[in-house]
Every structure is written in C-alpha cells, then in structure tokens.
Amino acid sequence: MNVVSLVGRPNTGKSALFNRLVKKRVAIVFDQPGVTRDRVTRETELGNRKVMLVDTGGIAFDRRVTHDPLDAETRAQAALAVEDSAVCVVVVDAREGIAPLDAEVIQRVRESGVPCLIAANKCDTADDDWRAHEFARFGLPVFATSAEHGRGVAALVEAVVQKLPPVNEEEAAAKRPLRVAVVGRPNAGKSSYINRLLNAPRVIVSEIPGTTRDAVEVPFAIGSGPEARRYLLVDTAGMKPHTQMSKTSVDNFSLFRSEQAIAEADVVVLVMDPVLGPTLQDKRIAGKILDAHRACVVMMNKWDVAQEQGLTETKATAALRAMMPFLNFAPVVYCSNKSGYNIRRTVDAIDVAAASATMKISTGMLNNVLVKAAKKTLSPMVKGKRLKIYYGLQVSTNPQTIRLFVNDPKLVTPAYLSYLEKNIRARFGLEGAPLRIFCKARARTAAAPGARGGRTETPVPEESGS
C-alpha cells in the first residue's frame, strides 16, 4: 500500500491534519512541541485510493525548542517515513511564515527524491490565504489549508492522489489486515517486541518510561501476494495506574489511545514480566481486555532472565492461572525480545486466537454438546425448580456469543454457566477467544387443539428422575 507522509517542524499542525484526513482523532494533538515521537500510521482512503497515512515527529528538531531527550530517535523515525513514502506533504505554519527549519525539511525531502508538496496550514479564513504564497519560492505546489476547519483539504487530497503511482494488482487485492494491539505496563517490552518481529527499529525503544505516547500502527506481513498473512501491529503507551499518572493532558490522551486500541483490535497481546509476576496493574489491563470482549494472547517477555532465576514454564503458568483465572482462555507464550526465543510462536498464537474468535459453530453440533453436558451433570435446583435448556445457537462472532433458550433465565447459576462454557470450549477449542453465553426465556405460543403447523420444541434431555 502506498505511503503518504506528513512531515515538518514541530507545531505546524501535522497531527491535526492527519486526524482531519483519516476523519478520526487518532494522533495526539496538543499545543506543545515534540508530542509526536513515533510514526503514527492509519490506513485510509484519499480520493478513491487506499493509502497508509503517516504522521511524523519533527524531521528537523531543534532541541532548544522541544527539550526532548529522544529528539534524535524522533528525527530518525521521520527520516525513515520519508524513505518509505510515495508522496510527502510538508506541513508549514502559514501564520509564522518561512522558518529556517522549514527550509531544512524541504531540502531533506527533495534529497530523498520523493514527490512532495506543501500544505500551508492555519489559513483559517480566505483572508489568510495570501500567507501561503510566501512558500512558493521553494518551487513546489503550495496549498492554503486549515486542518482545524477543513479549508483547502479537498484540493490538497486531489493533488496527492495525482502524484500517487498507478494502482497495482497487490494494492487492489489487499485484504483488511488483522489488527493486533500490543498492551502492558510501561517498560514491559511492547516496542521491543514489534521491532524484533520486523527486525528493524520501527518504533522508538528507550529505558525512559512513557517513551511511546500515541498508539502506533505498524503494517507487518508474512509472505507476499494475495496469500500473504497481513497484520497491523498497534504499539501502545504503557498503561500506568491512575495513582502514578501525571496531571498532563498528554498522559491522559495516551491512556485513552491505549484503551481505544484495545477496543478496536481483533487480538490483544498482553505483555507481562514473568519475574514480577501478575501485578495489580496487569490485572487491571486484563480487565479492560475482558470488558472489550477481545481475543487475547498473554506474552511472558524476558523469559531468558526468568530462567536464570530458576523459573519454569510449569510454575509460571500455574501461578498465572491461579492469580488471573478470568484469563484462563488465553494462551501463554514465553519468549524473549532480546534473544528472539519463541517470537515466531507468538505470531502462531495470534493466528489461533483470531481464528477462534471468528469460528462459525454449527447449531446442530452446539446442541449436541449441550445434550451431553445436561446428561452428564444436572442443573442445580433453584427454589424447587430446575433449569431446562431447549436449544442454543451462535448469534455472533468476535466476540463469540451464544444464546440459550431456556424455561427461566432466573434458574441459571454462574457455576452451571461456567460448566457449560467448559464443555463448549472442550468441543470447539476457542483458544484465546472470550465466550459470552446469554440465556433467554423461550416464547410460549399455544397452538389450537388439532391445528396444523404447530411446532413443539423438545428440551435438551435430562437424566431420568430430574
């Protein structure tokens, strides 16, 4: 997919323009230099073309402006974005006029050989459009735009589309990639994991907590052509406990983006430290995954360090299941970003979880499981009555949802519902996929005596004497 990058010096409105083009608040917009560090990407349509739109940090940071210890890494990410681009849009601040850093950005983009044009941003009214003409001295097409109000954006998009290369077969046949959110506490190894998968420094890694701020989307593929397995890895900011969060808006935005990434994901990878074990914050993050009903894989990172301290997979798994029983459906993979141990297995586990979340369950096979479960174990008596299950069916996937038609939903106990879930999982697998079971009272329709067409439903049989 063609890449369109937005580049420029700090605080010109790149992130605001990015959000305007994708028609969604994805990148963090805040009146502070250096907020964006990694490349923030989003698949979107410009005109009639599918593109990967990229928001970057400043390509020519002046540390005296940003005061950011990671400015060198941010510049490197922006430079890599330019290299990958089919078209670059240099975003400038029309109200401030030409700054030395603007000239430096344009020079660097020109040296890359990538087609580029200039978006003179913050031309909020027609009276401001004259300010854009100053940038014509660079010999590039200039468009007076306002990311905040949407002025001039349509003309900018049309010009970008015209500079894109012709549509190729792979772009036309590309399917929606599997969206995988990588979440966890700060410094758990989320960014390192993505860099290890890609074997490239795609996201910034640092010992400084809070390095990642946005939810950074990274395309990833295994194989090529129509049969390729395509993924969109989403690196998220470390989710801190509320008591440790600072009062800055950037931290609040980062937490919101992480929660949003969980809600939008097909599969969530929860990265944990096996030496520390499941912390209270790990449980809170797992709770957010459950609340969003997302498929999940637990990734125990830094396993090489854990082994040096005498930990085994058997002991670690037993402790995890005991402390987080609500996540027992999720597979656990022990790996090491540093050595590469079991990294490929994490991708296999993601594929299994995604397949489980979208599995179609035959109504006949499902009811066969329910029949056997009811024969094996009776439902408990509640106020002298016993639950009767007439039939069940799958009503949706991702999340897996099953509806049971029963005589009275009030007779369902959590323990018996858990028993039914275990039987369903034992038959269909569903590893990594949450399973929701809802009970509904069967509608009772009385047919006239001797009338034709009356339908009688037989409940799932119970043992004699029930």
Image: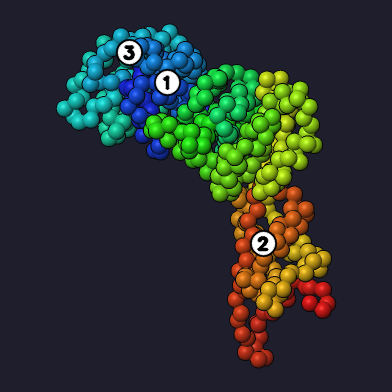
Mark 2 highlights which residue?
Answer: 414
Is residue 226 in view from this perspective? no
Given residues 304 and 43, the one toward you in this image is 304
Drawn side of residue 103 relative to residue 300, left or right? left
Mark 3 highlights which residue?
Answer: 102
Residue drawn at point x = 26 percent, y = 10 percent: 137
Q: Residues within 10 Å of mark 3 (few under 14, many from 20)?
A: many
Whole-angstrom CA distance, mark 2 to mark 3, is 63 Å
Q: Is residue 89 above or below residue 448?
A: above
In this view, which residue lies farthest toward the bottom? Answer: 449
Q: Where is residue 153 in the image (x, y as percent from the top left)?
A: 32, 31
Tag 1 or tag 3, which sits nearer the N-term?
Answer: 1
Residue 294's image quarter?
top right
Q: Where is residue 62 in the image (x, y as percent from the top left)?
A: 37, 11
Residue 15's image quarter?
top left
Q: What quarter of the picture does the C terminus occupy?
A: bottom right
Q: Is residue 117 above or below residue 408?
A: above
In this view, which residue lies farthest toward the left? Answer: 127
Q: What element carries label 3?
A: helix
